[in-house]
Amino acid sequence: MKKTLGCIRKADTDFRLIEDGDRVAVGVSGGKDSLLLLHALSLYRKFSHKHFSLKAITVDNGIGSPDYSGIASLCDSLEIPWSLEETQIGDIIFNYRKEKNPCALCAKMRRAVLAKACLASGCNKLALGHHREDAVETFLLSLLYEGRFHTFHPVTRMSRTGIVVIRPLVYLPESHVRHMQKVLDLPVVRSSCPADGHTERESMSLLLSELRKKYPDIAERILHALQHEPYDLWQKEPSVPAPGPEEESL
């Protein structure tokens, strides 16, 4: 856990993710990333000397019958309030719209539900569990499919709601997330999404694995490039940056 907390501290220092008085909602999907984030933030709150509150929010897509009892138990043990937001996102995407590439729309709709839940519970920030490889894969997707240098920023403001999205795990390698999942025996909820494992992001994950065989430190190099001229996609600024293209409409 020391490495996880160290990466969170570095991200917090670099991008001022959490301030005293913040009311932070953690989007807990049931995946290893968000579960580790929830557990780590509960510890970070104790030793960071920052006074902030935590709440866990899970969005149910309306696909299958996931068992969230493990999440409920974890939140209870961490003394963090938890709420479940039931939706019909899956039906809208797969049956009504019949999306061939559903991930972008699904993520946008889920963020909108999370933002609404944040407002309802009095939270001003939403923490998501994106790790280092998520940032690199998003960069590769943008480069190869859109022809531009872009990825999500560690801190972004949702223009319609004013909720600030933070990503405290952006420096943490996915390999360490997997390691901590086993160490902490996190109650991962199996995905019931029919597109799981068959997305363009999965293709980027495989591409990154292949590139890593020849360039073992490629993820670190790409993150380094994001923070330095002439790109400066991850500027270390004291103020919250302007809304990113992926979240302007939320």
Image (cartoon, rainbow, N blue to C red):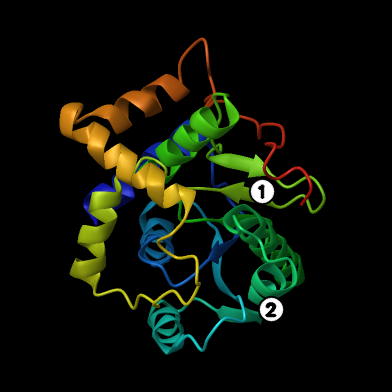
Query: Please, which residue is most extreme toward the top here?
Result: 230
Residue 237 sits above or below residue 26 on the image: above
Tell whether 236 sits left or right of 190: right
Tell whether 149 sits left or right of 176: right
Work out whether mark 2 precedes mark 1 in sequence or the reverse, and give the earlier one. 2
10 Å neighbourhood of mark 2: few (<14), some, or many (≥20)? some
The three-letter code of the residue at mark 1 reads: Val
Comparing 230 with 16, the one in front is 230
Residue 171 visible? The answer is: yes
Tell whether 25 sits left or right of 195: right
Marks 2/1 in contact by CB < 8 Å: the verdict is no
Q: Residue at x 51, y 89 (%)?
A: 65
Can you identify the residue that label 2 sits on?
87
Quarter residue 97 falls in: bottom right
Question: Which image quarter is the N terminus in?
Answer: bottom left
Q: Position of residue 29 (x, y in %)?
A: 49, 69
Residue 224 sits above or below residue 40 on the image: above
The three-letter code of the residue at mark 2 reads: Thr
Residue 22 visible? The answer is: no
Q: Position of residue 162 (x, y in %)?
A: 77, 49
Comparing 248 with 50, the one in front is 248
Comparing 59 with 36, the one in front is 59
Quarter residue 137 falls in: top left
